[in-house]
Image (cartoon, rainbow, N blue to C red):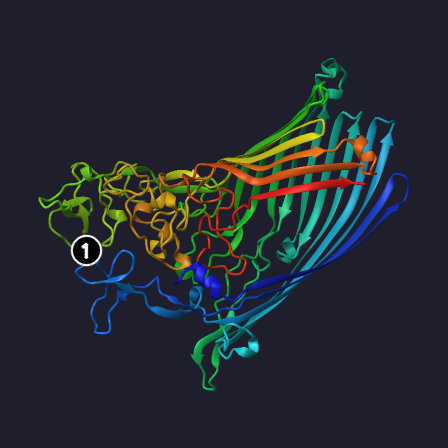
Amino acid sequence: MRSPASEIRQANTANMENNYTNINLGALINITKDWTLDIDYTHANEESILNRPGTRFTDLNTWGSATERLDADGNQVYVNSSGNIVSAGSADAMPAYTLSYFEYTGAGATPDHIYRKSTNARRNTFNAYTTYNLNVADEHMFKFMLGMNRVTWRERFNWSQVTQLIDITNPQFDLAHGTQTAGGEFDWESQLGFYGRVNYAFADRYLLEANLRYDGTSKFPSGLQWRWFPSFSVGWRASEENFMQWMKPAVSSLKIRGSWGTIGDQTVSNKLYVSTMSAGQTTWIGGDNTRLPYVGTPSAVISSITWQDITTLDVGLDARFFNNALGISFDWYQRDTKNMIVPASDVTYGFGVEAPKANFGSLRTRGWEIAVDYNHRFSNGIGINLMATVSDAITEITAYSDTRSIDDWYVGKKYGEIWGYRTDRLYQKDDFLYNSDGSLQTAWIKDGVLYETEVPGAKKVNKLKDGNAVYQDYLQNDNFIFGPGDVKYKDLNKDGEINDGSRTVEDHGDLEVIGNSTPRYEYGFRLGADYKGFDISLFFQGVGKRDVWGNGFLAIAGFNSADGAMPQAIAGNFWKEDRTDAFYPRAYNLGYTTPAMSTYNSSAYNMNVQSRYLLNMAYLRLKNITVGYSLPRDVLRKIHIQKARVYISLENFFTWDHLRGLPIDPEEVQGYSMFADENYNYNRTGVGTPTFKSFSVGVQLNF
């Protein structure tokens, strides 16, 4: 039957091969005792070969409609619950159906083919810098540095494909006779920078560093390629002051520091300021029986495009206590990305091409991080150690070519925010009115007015018992009408309707920010102990807060349920008349669309983006637990071994999450394929390669 398992058995194998060559040359020249010159050069070459052979599959069509199974005389065949043929009058007889047997190709209806892509990329890096150290009266310590950095990169690739394989089990270019296509590209870029640095320390207590860079890049127009980027940092080792000596050894060291600096970001396309026109072949045939060429519309550009600036302010504190046994480090930072390259605003569809990009945007990130470590050995020989870190950051858009659309970037938007409906509960049978025969009473609604008979432009609804209840006709169509077991959304703006307004910041109807997909409060801690050769360590990692609106059958109830697979957490907990307290709504197939439109499967009817089915991706995972034993040194000395340790290690064996039994790895959220941008699993939640669990036993020997 058509299924992933069947397609894997029949598929040809794609492969990607990467060959790397790396050459490093360098020299350190000691001009004087305090003056050095460092030079290094790196040549890196990467060759990549991708072979992607397509094929044809032959299966029973589980995606299509079944047909009646007939006997030789054309009569309906009946079977029992075991699938055995029985007479039509048998107690458990049911009509038998047959799936059609058909041949098809892969995703996107691409014919069977042989495809090969060859890429060659070269990077050359040259660094040269000189350093001079100056000591004045053993109290004033200077360090001066001047340097340069040059990077060049170029990449060429070409690909070719031929369809219609003669032998689908042996995909070769000479064994295909269909359409031949080919293409390729040449890309290059380069950067050149000069920099200087001064370090100063007075009495090993007051620290200063100042930097200045002058960087150029090929990414921007010639008049805007070069920029100056300054930065500096200061530090005060307060624990070295005379008035702080009374605190030792309780306070072993204390350092207060701060820094500010700007660096340039040019990690953008190198074609943003050059107007280009796409070219290719049309499907029209000319007089010479060849396809006619075409040249597309020139892209719109803004010639003043230049560097994006990243400015960071950081203040921090480093302290150690109790003879360095306990350490604490704290940082607070603010990072502003200014002159961010974003599309221009107010470009209409009649403009004809995509909006040009330039330095119109900015965003700000504020965050903090705390790290704590502790080491101690007791008098009885037991040693313990602890290390813990926790960090958090929030990013907000501070300037943009503002559309004010909640589906776009707008000033004030928090990076990762999720807009959706606030869920009230599931409808129950008592919420509706019924006819004398037990069927649901229906009516028609238009512009908030309920009609007993059908009127033009009205939608059919099931009548609610509460005369003041809000109908959800905006979220339904002729194929789906809200009834018992369906989701009841909240009317947040109290206008008597459930809708999303114009989906702008000023008019978003009953939508609100219900979560954020940015990981918050990321933390980790390591615990360890040792005693008389035995040692144990545990490393935990987690995320304190993260929300994701799922995509795909592992997260969305009813997502293309015709595929015939769903998690037991959904299959065993959906609403039905004898299970009205279920978590998921009544069974309904959201249908199938192409991968490019897969959001339809994940946000419709009962599964509109909402608070009830938002995935809580916070988790705690025991990443590693290791137990070891080191043999006594006096025993090892006799066999000329310096150290021998045996250990057992468990990786990723235990995870605590809030996913209610859904088989989703909270660390690996989205599906991904290195061979295809769009396939059945593209961007579907939980279908990527999960974090593997591993168990290992090892021996470490030092001779």
Answer with left or right where residue 453 lies relative to residue 72: left
Instruction: Tell me which corner region of the image, top left, top right, bottom left or bottom right, holds residue 563.
Output: bottom left
Q: Is residue 499 above or below residue 103?
A: above
Q: Which residue is mark 1?
A: 91
Q: Residues within 10 Å of mark 1 (few under 14, many from 20)?
A: few
Q: Position of residue 431 (x, y in %)?
A: 19, 38
Q: Is residue 253 above or below residue 466?
A: above
Q: Position of residue 623 (x, y in %)?
A: 57, 38
Outermost residue on the right side: it is 32
Q: Position of residue 4 (x, y in %)?
A: 44, 59
Quadrant into which the C terminus falls: top right
Q: Position of residue 379 (x, y in %)?
A: 72, 18
Q: How many marks?
A: 1
**Looking at the image, which residue is at 60% across and 34% down?**
539
Residue 609 visible within the image:
no
Residue nearest the viewer, comparing 417 with 478: 478
Q: Amino acid at mark 1?
A: Ala
